[in-house]
Image (tube, rainbow, N blue to C red):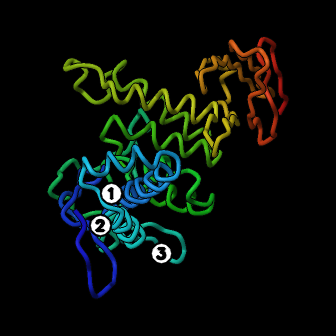
Amino acid sequence: RVSYNKKLSLYEVKEVTGPDEYHKGVDNNSYTNYLARWNLLYAAELYNKFLEMYPTRLKKLSKKMDLSQNEVEKWRDIGNMIMFLIGKNGLIEEFQGYFGKRNDVIEQWDEKGMPIYSKDEEELKHTQLVKQADVILLLHLFPNDFTADIKKMNFDYYDARTTHLSSLSPCISAILATELNDIDKAYKYFRYAVNGDLKDYFGNTELGMHAASLGGIWQLVINGFAGVRVKGDILSINPRLPRNWQNLEFKLIWRGSNISFRVSGDKVEIFLSSRNKKIKLPMSIYNKACYIGAGKLTTVAR
């Protein structure tokens, strides 16, 4: 729930816990505030789109929901005025007061390549150490909203302070590492993530698989190493495979079409299956615009 700060002329979100569970009940967690902003602005955008496309249906639905256009305008006003803690240099503060915490960084790693640190959560809450990807998760979810320089600055800062105690963390950091072309670090986190259950790195696999982590690992392989992203209305692929991977094969369904991919170090091969044999699917491959036809193999070299 937002509250208005008259002094700053901004809306705040207080007493929340973001992805980083070492710091509970904080004010203006940047991940939380940014998502709240996005939800409000996108809801207002959809309302106006539906008003243009389906005015009669929207009028009936709005009456049923007791939703007025003034309320929608309020969503937009609040969304545009929610506090977001980003400095002039582009460094995002995880939450209000985070930079005032003790500036601990990871200085030791175990045989698995993961951080060694104090496990005392009472002590950890007074430090800048982070349990899992928080600001880094924000940058992953909104890749088109931040420049490469901002991503790198924040990744370098928070990666040095993240303990990855949560199984949800290594895969997200790895995805951003691939985007920043740090493939060795991404692969290190990939190995840690997949071995979380295979080798019981978290010490609780007997209680069940970390199912959400499996989804994160899939995202790492497809969005990270394979470099598959949606940019506007275009499916984009720009692979960055680990050095010991020869190739990667996978399938996706995109707008009703089945697409088979095979990527290697120097090319991408695509086969599009569609009932519409005349389809020409726009894609971006290695940042090159192209059209993929149905029923034939398309190969694009790096």
Secondary structure type for disc 1: helix
Amino acid type of disc 1?
Thr
For the C terminus, the quadrant is: top right
| Quadrant of res 238 | top right
**Viewer-nearest residue: 16 or 247:** 16
Q: Residue at x 18, y 63 (%)?
A: 15
Residue 178 in the image, given as x and y percentages of width and height: 60, 41
193 w.r.t. 6: above or below = above
Amino acid type of disc 3?
Gly
For the N terminus, the quadrant is: bottom left
Label 2 sits on residue = 28
Q: In 3D space, how far apart are the residues under numbered discs 3 and 2 (Cα atoms)?
A: 14 Å
Amino acid type of disc 2?
Asn
Q: In 3D space, how far apart are the residues under numbered discs 1 and 2 (Cα atoms)?
A: 7 Å
Q: Residue furthest bottom?
A: 7
Dot 3 alpha-carbon crowd within 10 angstroms: few under 14, some 14 to 19, many 20 or more: few
**Viewer-nearest residue: 173 or 17:** 17
Relative to 3, 150 lies left or right: right
Secondary structure type for disc 3: loop
Residue 154 in the image, given as x and y percentages of width and height: 50, 60
Q: Residue at x 59, y 53 (%)?
A: 144
Q: Residue furthest front?
A: 56
Residue 64 in the image, given as x and y percentages of width and height: 25, 47
Label 3 sits on residue = 87
Label 1 sits on residue = 32
Dot 1 alpha-carbon crowd within 10 angstroms: few under 14, some 14 to 19, many 20 or more: many
